[in-house]
Amino acid sequence: MLTGNALRQSFLDYFVARHHTQVRSSSLVPENDPTLLFTNAGMVQFKSVFLGQERLPFTRATSAQKCLRISGKHNDLEAVGRDTYHHTFFEMLGNWSFGDYYKEEAIGWAWDLLTREWRLPKERLWTTVYLDDDEAERLWIKVAGIPTERILRFGQKENFWEMGETGPCGPCSEIHLDRGLEACDRKMVKGHRCLVNGDCARFIELWNLVFIQYNRNDQGSLQDLPAKHVDTGMGMERITAVLQGVLSNYDIDYMRDLIRTTEDLAAKKYGESAEQDLSFGVIADHARAVAFLIADGVVPSNEGRGYVLRRLLRRAARHGRPIGPPLQRRLGRRLDFEAPRAHHRLCLGAG
Ligand code: GLY
């Protein structure tokens, strides 16, 4: 089985072999950016490069970025515990072009990595493009050979990516995977249809390719940027689930390591009831968010980032109560923290 750590490395190696510079993940607390509470995408550390305010000694980059989506434009808090493929904290695998390559290479490499290197079945992949992006549609046909009926057009909400209320942005093209009818979690809902960008777990978005060409200014209008850029993002937990052949992100290797720790603390087994599993998942998700926030210098408080951290701790504790005896009573036991630690050491060191 390809472990999560091996998959991260395989992504980074793929782009390094294509002359991308591997960049370390930046902090969850964005540097000098009052417009964002938390780093919510891999592109955040490159914002000033896209805006033409900074030049780096390279024009191609790749990273595995720690992200937190719990405030502002990208907030997945409520989805955690409701589905098994959204997280507050996750790693985003990405590749970037700063005024270097554009749509053709971005599309070609994404397709090649997914279908040749990682062997995803081509016939199960769908793509979406922005309403008027004929060029991207043409390239999906030319470079990837996707039939037109599996290339769908969507508007602003689905296919125009923005980091926040202001900042670099542009039309995007997404790759979705059809995981088959067995993955649908709304089969019993009358009138439900499984659709790309629908409301069930059958079709999941794997990778977002953003063609950054505008800046949204603080009056809300779009200005052309001096150059065109590529910004891609792929949720590592989702692609790991796909490549490990599991439907839930909580069943991937490094999430199960965390769940095993909760099993040990609670003296309960994961997999006994759907309601209990949901709590195991929320605790695993929030434990990661809390650990990485604290590692990046955030401490619990009554406002701002510290308040978000407190809310995460409280929500995780609320899910802990129904599944186990108070932690204090079990604290004398030896716990196996080694596996999660090994993963998180690698995560912090990656990129
Ligand atoms: N920046 C691309 C994404 O977050 O999807």
Image (cartoon, rainbow, N blue to C red):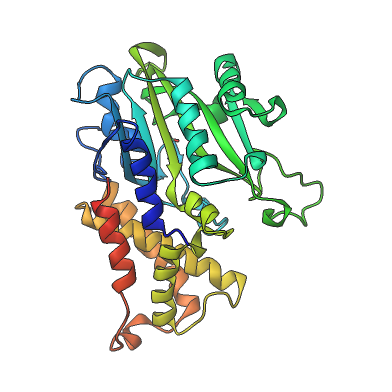
The residue under the point 39% across, 25% down is 230
Q: Is residue 289 above or below residue 278?
A: above
The residue under the point 41% across, 57% down is 4
Do we see residue 106 in this rendering? yes
The residue under the point 63% across, 35% down is 126
Q: Quadrant of the C terminus?
A: top left
Position of residue 110 in the picture relative to residue 217 (left or right): right
The residue under the point 54% across, 27% down is 159
Q: Is residue 108 above or below residue 10?
A: above
Position of residue 344 in the picture relative to residue 249 (left or right): left
Task: Find residue 132 and report its image quarter.
Answer: top right
Task: Find residue 234 and report its image quarter.
Answer: top left
Query: Can you give x and y, in whole percent of width and height, for residue 41 in the image?
Result: 37, 38
Where is ligand 1, by quadrant? top left
Q: Is residue 243 above or below residue 268?
A: above
Query: Can you give x and y, in whole percent of width and height, for residue 122 in the image?
Result: 62, 39
Taking depth in this image into account, of 84 and 238 the one nearest to the observer is 238
Taking depth in this image into account, of 245 and 268 the one nearest to the observer is 245
Do we see residue 299 in this rendering? no
Q: Is residue 203 above or below residue 275?
A: above
Task: Find residue 183 and report its image quarter.
Answer: bottom right
